[in-house]
């Protein structure tokens, strides 16, 4: 499976007027990422002022983490927070680790919340209505850690902690204060693509993009802010886009709207990559 990472600016929410719109936008981002099996969402500092959009970054990160958390763990992990007031309006992700009943069955892969740690075992909530005991296979774990657990027997007598599940388990969320160094490193062992209406027309470069995609196991897609695009962002940060990207592309030919919102560009970009890399 190709590893896909998306980079979104700290200021991604600056055009949203209230918490309802913020929540729905974060939900659309989470849904798009899950549909196309994005492995990681990285929020990056897009302005030279390190304090700029810090609050937006915190809220977006919180919402994205909330949406990707299985329903049975949300309350324990997040409790009640004012930023989560409108999450009931959001669409569920319905990824495999979310669509599980309380009755475990053999072969289930579940997300577990570590609640107690002993030398030979850990005790976790895996969404079966009770705490379960799992042999600790030399993992350094602490209370509050999230783990992936495979049910080896339906009666829960045999459970295994696994590192690399063979199903899609959702995205992780991280933050990046120095996107220039980060993208330079990413460019060394993967394909880094930017999206911009001022980029090269992708419809004129389909073969080139397709070849790059098929030769890369790791793909990073970078998006701009609601009011500032990639070229302006990275110029202000002191970076040269040629050093950071393999290509920056305009993804929509003869668009009918004045602007394309970031969450809309996300669906467009991931759809194209999905088709071109198949």
Image (cartoon, helix red, strand yellow):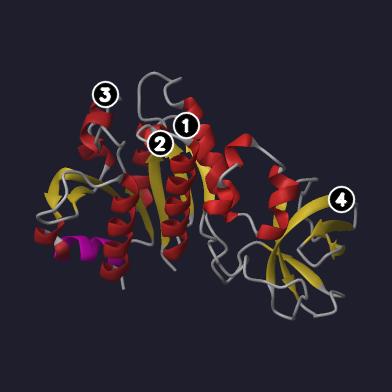
Q: Earlier in the sequence, mark 3 or mark 2?
A: 2
Position in image of residue 160 (x %, y %): 76, 68
Q: Secondary structure at mark 2?
A: helix
Residue 36 falls in image quadrant: bottom left
Position in image of residue 140 (x %, y %): 77, 49
Mark identifier at residue 13: 2
Residue, x 19% and y 54% (percent of image)?
251
Up/down of 153 relative to 44, above or below: below
In space, the residues marked 3 and 2 are separated at their CA atoms by 20 Å
Contact, CB < 8 Å: mark 3 with mark 2? no
Residue 212 sits inside the magenta stretch: yes
Q: Earlier in the sequence, mark 3 or mark 4?
A: 4
Question: Can you tell which of label 2 and label 4 is closer to the viewer?
Answer: 2
Q: Secondary structure at mark 3?
A: helix
Q: Which residue is mark 1?
A: 56
In space, the residues marked 3 and 4 are separated at their CA atoms by 47 Å
Position in image of residue 131 (x %, y %): 86, 60
In space, the residues marked 1 and 3 are separated at their CA atoms by 20 Å
Q: Secondary structure at mark 4?
A: strand
Q: Which residue is mark 4?
A: 117
Question: Can you tell which of label 3 and label 2 is closer to the viewer?
Answer: 2
Mark identifier at residue 247: none
Residue 71 falls in image quadrant: bottom right
Residue 124 falls in image quadrant: bottom right
Mark yes or no: residue 57 visible: yes
Question: Magenta span: helix, strand or loop, mainly?
Answer: helix
Contact, CB < 8 Å: mark 1 with mark 2? yes
Contact, CB < 8 Å: mark 1 with mark 3? no
Q: Which residue is mark 3?
A: 236
For the record, the magenta segment spans 207-214
Contact, CB < 8 Å: mark 3 with mark 4? no
């Amino acid at each position: 499976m190709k590893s896909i990472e998306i980079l979104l600016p700290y200021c991604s929410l600056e055009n949203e007027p209230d918490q309802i719109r913020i929540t729905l936008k974060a939900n659309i981002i989470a849904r798009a990422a899950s549909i196309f099996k994005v492995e990681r969402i990285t929020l990056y500092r897009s302005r030279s002022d390190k304090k700029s959009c810090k609050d937006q970054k915190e809220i977006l990160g919180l919402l994205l983490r909330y949406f990707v958390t299985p329903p049975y763990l949300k309350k324990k992990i997040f409790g009640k927070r004012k930023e989560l007031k409108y999450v009931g309006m959001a669409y569920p992700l319905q990824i495999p680790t979310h669509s599980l009943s309380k009755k475990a069955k053999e072969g289930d892969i579940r997300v577990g919340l570590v609640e107690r740690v002993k030398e030979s075992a850990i005790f976790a909530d895996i969404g079966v209505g009770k705490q379960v005991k799992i042999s600790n296979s030399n993992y350094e774990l602490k209370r509050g850690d999230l783990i992936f657990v495979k049910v080896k027997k339906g009666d829960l007598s045999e459970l295994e902690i696994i590192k690399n599940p063979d199903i899609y388990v959702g995205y992780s969320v991280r933050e990046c204060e120095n996107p220039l160094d980060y993208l330079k490193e990413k460019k060394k062992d993967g394909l880094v693509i930017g999206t911009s209406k001022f980029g090269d027309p992708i419809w004129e470069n389909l073969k080139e993009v397709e070849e790059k995609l098929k030769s890369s196991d790791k793909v990073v897609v970078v998006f701009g802010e609601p009011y500032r695009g990639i070229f302006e962002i990275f110029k202000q940060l002191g970076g040269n886009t040629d050093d950071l990207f393999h290509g920056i592309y305009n993804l929509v030919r003869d668009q009918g709207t004045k602007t394309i919102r970031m969450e809309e560009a996300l669906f467009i970009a991931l759809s194209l990559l999905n088709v071109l890399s198949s």
